Amino acid sequence: MTSSITEIETYGVERIPDEDRTARPIDLFRLAFGGANTFATCVLGAFPILFGLSFWQGLAATVLGLVAGALLLAPMALFGPANGTNNAVSSSAHLGVHGRVVGSFLSLLTAVAFFSISVWSSGDALVGGAHRLVHVPESDATYGIAYAIFAGLVLVVCIYGFRFMLLVNKIAVLAASALFVLGAFAFAGDFDPGYAGTFASTADPLFWPSFIGAALIVLSNPVSFGAFLGDWSRYIPAGTPRRRVMGAAFLAQIATLLPFLFGLATASIIASKAAKYVDPAAPNYVGGLLAISPGWYFLPLCLIALIGGLSTGTTSLYGTGLDFSSVFTRFSRVQATFFIGALSIAFIFAGRFALNLAQSISTFATLIITCTAPWMIVMTLGYVTRRGWYDADALQVFNRRQRGGRYWFTHGWNWRGMSTWLVSAVVALLFTNLPGQFVGPLGNLAGGTDISLPVGLALAVVLYLALLTLFPEPRAVYGPAGPRFVRASDAPVPPITGGSEEIVPEPAAAH
């Protein structure tokens, strides 16, 4: 890893050498918190009000979703220090050498969604603020220019790499937090915690579907980091205590209660003073926020949009470019980042000018957690059953275009993990209920409440442990201490071939 922020990072997904792994858990906190302490998170925080909840009901849904998501996410920080690579590559251990492409797909889906949200929300705020301050016209051309400039800035930071991102996020954490606190003074006179929402009581048949839906959107924010967390934690030394690494990831998400509260509180003010901006048919949180903001807060609001959006965009795009370069080895990390960035920018323009933005965000958020949460369960349970032991060299077989090794399983696929992820994700999709957007065939079984996440999580836990018990994995995939909670088989492991030399894995100790 380079020592200067002005030098372009050259590492791809190969294992980071121990001498270059100098990051600390606090750096992980800064990157994860900085990537979520943004205007895009405020937009997600406004959804409980857009769904008709009162302020206190919205706060309860926000805390529920945030804590649940942070608990689900925290173990995903452990793979980076253990293996010195990103989480998609580490997933080879549980889904197979070829099955790791699932993690790459999930990171691509998440990156495009949250990169788009950050550019959309930040670009809208910048144009709206400029219109109020210096009368810049609010036209499609103006918005297009703002999106292009902002997306270009994000792309530059991602190309320079980890050290530059760390600097940006160090600034973003402090600056955005201070500006959000300043916002408390800007809106204090208009804020009413007694905002009642649209539901007369919790007995309303639409209340619980709205409450659960709001909690799921909040939960999607921490879960969206699942595929990316190893991108940054891989620079943390392997000997760092696990509790500190997990604690940094957990607390980074809990700290995002600040932007979530900002979005929730300001949305309740918008609903009271400028209700047209929370019309379910065409909600416009950014426009409403600008409409209720005092004139002196326009500049701080634009700074939040710029700094926070830059932070969210970089944390989303960096990891996907990194992983794409390992799937398509003809691309370097820089080339892959530029390629994915260009595709994302094209998607941003199509989504902003051709689709319903609020519905797009809601649908993306739900689909992300529906598909990603079972994958995270496989990874977490796999880590527990393997006692955190991995063969870092065997994890790189796919990237080196080799064959065999401890994680080859069946032609490069571990059908236990793959089946668990696929079945759980598909069943969860069947139970999805997003009225007016996407309702699965079984989506109405719970009275209109979206129970896709608990169904997917529970099924993944039961199915994966059952498969590991009934169809034991080879003993060689476990460390010297052997498996935990499950059995191991004596199936042979093929040697690694295709490189400069043949590598025969040493058998794990028998137990």
Image (tube, rainbow, N blue to C red):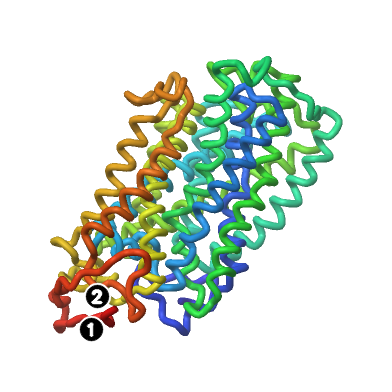
What residue is drawn where x is 28% and y is 55%? 417
Tell me the distance, in whole angstroms, between the alpha carbons under discs 1 and 2: 7 Å
Q: Earlier in the sequence, mark 1 or mark 2?
A: 2
SS state under label 1: loop
Tag 1: amino acid: Glu
Q: Quadrant of residue 52?
A: top right
Secondary structure under tag 2 reads: helix
Give me the disc on residue 141: none
Q: Which residue is mark 2?
A: 476
Marks 1/2 in contact by CB < 8 Å: the verdict is: yes
Question: Does the image show residue 1?
Answer: yes
Question: Badge 2: how crowded within 10 Å, few (<14), some, or many (20+)?
Answer: many
| Residue under label 1 | 506
Callout 2 amino acid: Ala
77 vs 251, left or right, is left
Give how far across and how far down residue 33 sits, in percent: 61, 55
The structure residue drawn at horizontal position 56% and vertical position 39%, both measured from the top left corner, is 218
